[in-house]
Each structure stands twice: as C-alpha cells, then as structure tokens.
Image (cartoon, grey):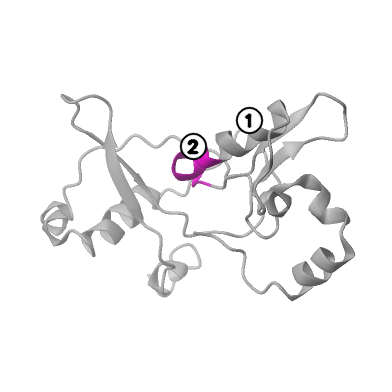
Amino acid sequence: MARSTETKHLLDEFPSGVHARPEGGPDSDVVLALWTYDVRPVEPVFPFTVDPFYPEIVFRGLAGMIPGLSTYFGRMPKPVVDGGYYTKTRENRPLIGPLPVKGAYLMGAFSGYGIMASCAAGELLAAHLTGSPLPSYAPAFALERYQDPEYQKLLEKWGDTGQL
C-alpha cells in the first residue's frame, strides 16, 4: 500500500467522525454508516465519483468503536454506496434565514449534520417566516453575516474547516 499513490493515503491517520445508525423500520437489517474523512473543498461534478475504498474504510473505522465488526474483515457484506456532496459554508455553519429576494428564505449547508440540527433549524426558520422574536444567536446563521467586516476578519483567522 505504501508504494502506490492510489493507496498510500490509506496509511495516514484518519480524522474522527465515523458514525452509524439503524436505517428503516423495526424489521430492517440496514445500517447507515458514514465517514467524511476527505474534507477538501471541491467543485461539484456529475456524475460524482466514489472512493472505491470507502465502504471498507468506513467499516474498519467503525470496528474501532465496535470491535466485533472486525470478524467481517476479509468477508464484508456487500455494501450499497449512495451519496453526494456535503454542502457547507466556509466555516461549516448553516445558512438559516431570509434571502435578499423578498419572501425567499434559506435553510441549508448542514454538511452532514442536518438530521441532528433540523429541528432547531426549522424552529429558527419558522421564527423568521412568522415574524416571531428571533433568538440572540440568529445572526450567526444569517446570510448577511458575510457582509459584516468583523465576521470577515474572523473568517480569515478561522483555522479549521469546522467539519464534524
């Protein structure tokens, strides 16, 4: 592996973040397993490519948390790989609030944590839509934050991509 440019990166330390959860109803035997180990920004292309090593990398990463999975090394179940791009802002903070076009609103750029944040994000968007009082943190998710010179300075000092 070390001699091949295609596989050399597999010997490097991987970032944290591997996770899994049951998928489907009570009788389902499907597990959704994810790991955003490559967080480099890229321009979207279609059709997108999937790392051929992705299923095994994720499975081996999960085995670090669930050691019993290691019994499947060398005889993994056939995975179904489905995916796309994680859309995110530079600092990996979602966009929630009004757009410059009157009556248009935005809630997106959740970068893979949308399931975890969707209830709170929906509540914040509903407050915008209904004219209800906004919480003190609302500006942190507004599109207008990028027009704020102080926020621009903060972004220049932001060292990490914020990937969860």
Q: Residues within 10 Å of mark 2 (few under 14, many from 20)?
A: few
Q: Residue at x 18, y 31 (%)?
A: 29
Residue 72 left/right relative to 10: left
- The chief SS type of the magenta part is helix
State the residue at coordinates (87%, 29%): 101
Q: Nearer the viewer, residue 116 or 68?
A: 116
Q: Nearer the viewer, residue 84 or 113?
A: 113
The residues bearing labels 1 and 2 have C-alpha atoms spaced at a distance of 11 Å
State the image coordinates of residue 115 (x, y, percent, origin top left): 45, 39
Q: Is residue 61 left or right of residue 113?
A: left
Q: Which residue is mark 2?
A: 119
Residue 44 among magenta residues: no
Residue 57 sits in which quadrant? bottom left
Where's residue 46, x and y in %?
A: 64, 33
Amino acid type at circle 1 is Ala
Quarter occupied by the N terminus: bottom left
Mark 1, residue position: 126
Residue 104 vertical placement versus 40 (above, below): above
Do the residues bearing badges 1 and 2 touch, measured as CB atoms within 8 Å?
A: no
State whether residue 157 is above or below residue 28: below
Q: Please, what is the three-letter code of the amino acid marked with disc 2?
A: Cys
Q: Which residues are magenta?
A: 112-120
